[in-house]
Amino acid sequence: MKKYLIVIALIIGIYPTLLAQNAKMNSFIDSLMGKMTLLEKLGQLNLSSGAGNLPVITEGGGREDYIRQGLIGASQGRKSQEVAVKESRLGIPLIAGKDVIHGYATTFPIPLAMSCMWDTERIEKSARIAAKEAAVSGICWTYSPMVDICRDPRWGRIAEGAGEDPWLGSQIAKAYVRGYQGDDLSKDNTIMACVKHFALYGAVEAGRDYNTVDMSRLSMFQDYFPPYKAAFDAGAGSAMTSFNLVDGIPATGNKWLLNDLLREKWGFDGFIVTDFTAINEMMNHGMGDLQSVAVQALKAGVDMDMVGQSFIGTLGKSLKEGKVTQEEIDQACRRVLEAKYKLGLFDDPFKYFNEEKAKKILLCQEHLDAAREIASRSIVLLKNSEGILPLKKSGKIAVVGPLADSKSDMLGTWAGTRNTEKVVTILEGIKNVVGDKAEILYAKGSFFTTDPYLLNVNTKKEDYIVQTPKEEKQLLDEAKQTVSGADVIVAVLGESKAWSGEAASRSDIGIPECQQNLLKEMLATGKPVILVLANGRPLTLTWEDNHISAILEAWHGGTEAGNALADVLFGDYNPSGKLTTTFPRSVGQIPIYYNHKNTGRPFINDIKFTSKYLDIPNEPLYPFGFGLSYTTFEYSDITLDKTGMGLNDTINASVTVKNTGKYDGEEVVQLYIRDLAGSVSRPVKELKGFKKVLIPAGKSVVCTFRISAADLAFWHKDLIWGTEPGDFNIFIGANSRDVKGASFALLDKGSSFIIK
Ligand code: BGC
Ligand code: BGC
């Protein structure tokens, strides 16, 4: 009761202040817009990337000139801002956006890796640091978080998101927004978040980038929308549209999506920017000519055209012809100006340029320490069947593989400023951590690939050259020679940074053949081999899992990748990461995800007419939520405090988790629920909670989850959110496969309970 009174008092106290602030902003913008010409208004809707302008604007001589004429509203760089503020007629500042998706100068692991921490506080911290570094470097707006749910690891952009689960994805989405925006957007160390890609981009068919999407509304609401909604609820100031179709209409011109759902239903009051030239691309989607697609986008609710210049180029004509209204243009312009106002750009257009401070904080020790800690916590131990790990810091350790001593690949996709200088490679990290306690040997051992197709996309110049079999053999021989005196071999294999991210889909997501040959040769020595993977997506590792006894998934780990990996390799940090995306056995299983529906003929061994493949099991290689530790955990059965609950009741479900091994360790204890019967078919399991607990060796911890009716709610056929009474299974365990089970009932009170 007291809590409620405090909240009410706060609202009564804050509300008038908010109203007054809004009134002040509105009158400022009213007065500014009163002075703006149509072209100046359209200029606010125009984002220029700096490079490669499309030829819609014909008058004037280049970007600075356009800025001077008020024809550009968003762009980067101090010089541009000076021109905008000092030389344009109304001096309206530019908003400067950039893809700061896992760090600015200090680069954290790729977002997919960070999600494997199951640690929203540390994800928030990474975003806070990214914001601080960006905010002194001229950037006040980040095109992040990318919260697209993805069930297809062929899609290279899976690297940028938080995996396949809508519930976990929602917690992580909120953490990013809090980290970037802090509690006050007008501060000079916070930046505006841009939630992307709205919507459904992660569901592109066959994992091929920019491909089409066709999905039921039920699945949109149940499986794909939650993380976007969570990010908007957390107060994200802007949204980016996606390239794909939603319900047959490109997202960028989809009024139902942008206006009816996002703005009206969800109450989003920020501004909407398109993805890069997405309005123009609507022509390829078959939606009409440039003028017509620009009209569709504006009417759908888009405020800013990224790079395509369709708004600045055609909306004037459309206004004259009565195809759009002045109100529609004004509304978009107002939303862009509001964002600038909220960021404090009208008070001080240069507040995000602070070279002095940049020198002090970019890549400072505090940030690097955070990057190291976060990178080691993002690593997932996939296998350690003979207990080779952790390694001792002694003897002779051979490090081989094309990713062992690469700096730039550690940064992964969208690496902020792409500062490679400070990157610690895995070889360097191992040397740092071991000091003079052991001898470290190194040989590259193989190319990334010898496949000419894949070589073509590699961004490294030396790798453009087609590798000859002779050179390949030479590398292999060198490696064999190098490891001959070693006690143990660490093989660092995987993907170049150019193989994941945008426009980087792969049809074969295995380790390329020449790297595999190296691994086979290493194994043939009879010495213990540890496989360390540096990559941007789930890989198919069936052969590796069959033959290698120790596998660490280290991802593209960022600036501190090497130190972090070495911390885990030698046991200075006991790994606690858990996968947030399923690792398939083969590409043929894709799409594969844990929260699937049951079939009418679930698999039964030896019965022909059940759902299965003839050549591989249905189960993935490593399931969602999977990850090992150097210690072992034992789960007790689940205890429930009752087996039936009413709609306003809660049930407590507890397990005791015992650390039965030799090391202290952290465990991510996961809660899943299955609704056994519903008015629409329900998934076999859905994540509903987790607890990350540190359990000292030999000790036990009791984990209790409180379940309420709200946790059981789902989207009904008619897109109403609610709970239906009935029987539920509850699962608690170390991953989505290895769980203890119990059941309870939500008691029937005569009708289904609609929550909202
Ligand atoms: C990507 C976006 C990105 C934008 C700006 C686009 O091609 O799809 O994710 O934010 O470029 O760099
Ligand atoms: C098959 C049908 C078939 C029926 C009767 C089912 O298992 O799916 O196609 O007609 O058996 O043989």
Image (spheres, rainbow, N blue to C red):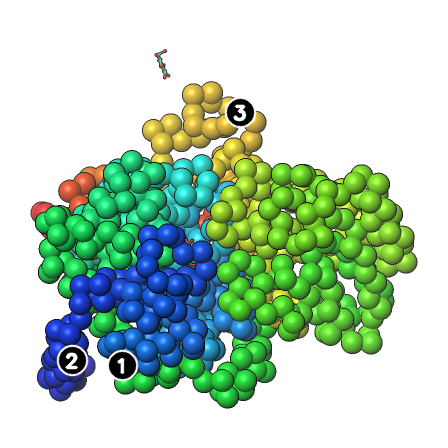
Q: Is mark 3 on a helix, strand or loop?
A: loop
Q: Nearer the viewer, residue 99 or 278?
A: 278
Q: Which mark is residue 346?
A: 1
Dividing the picture into quadrants, the one containing residue 631 is bottom right
Q: Foreground mark, 3 or 1? A: 1
First reached walking from the N terminus: tag 3 or tag 2: 2
Amino acid type, callout 1: Phe
When asked about the image quadrant of residue 342, the answer is: bottom left
Percent x, y of residue 601: 38, 27
Q: Are marks 2 and 1 in contact (CB under 8 Å)?
A: yes
Residue found at x 30% / y 49%: 279
Q: What residue type is labelled 3?
A: Leu
Label 1 residue near ligand 1, CB within 8 Å = no
Q: Looking at the image, in which quadrant does ligand 1 appear?
A: bottom left
**Pointer 3 local density, CA inside 10 Å: few below 14, some 14–19, many at least 20:** few
Q: Is residue 538 left or right of residue 38?
A: right
Residue 398 horizontal/vertical position (percent): 81, 60
User: In front: mark 3 or mark 2?
Assistant: 2
- Which amino acid, by three-letter code, is at mark 2? Phe
Q: Return the residue at label 3.
A: 614
What residue sits right under mark 2 in the picture?
Answer: 28
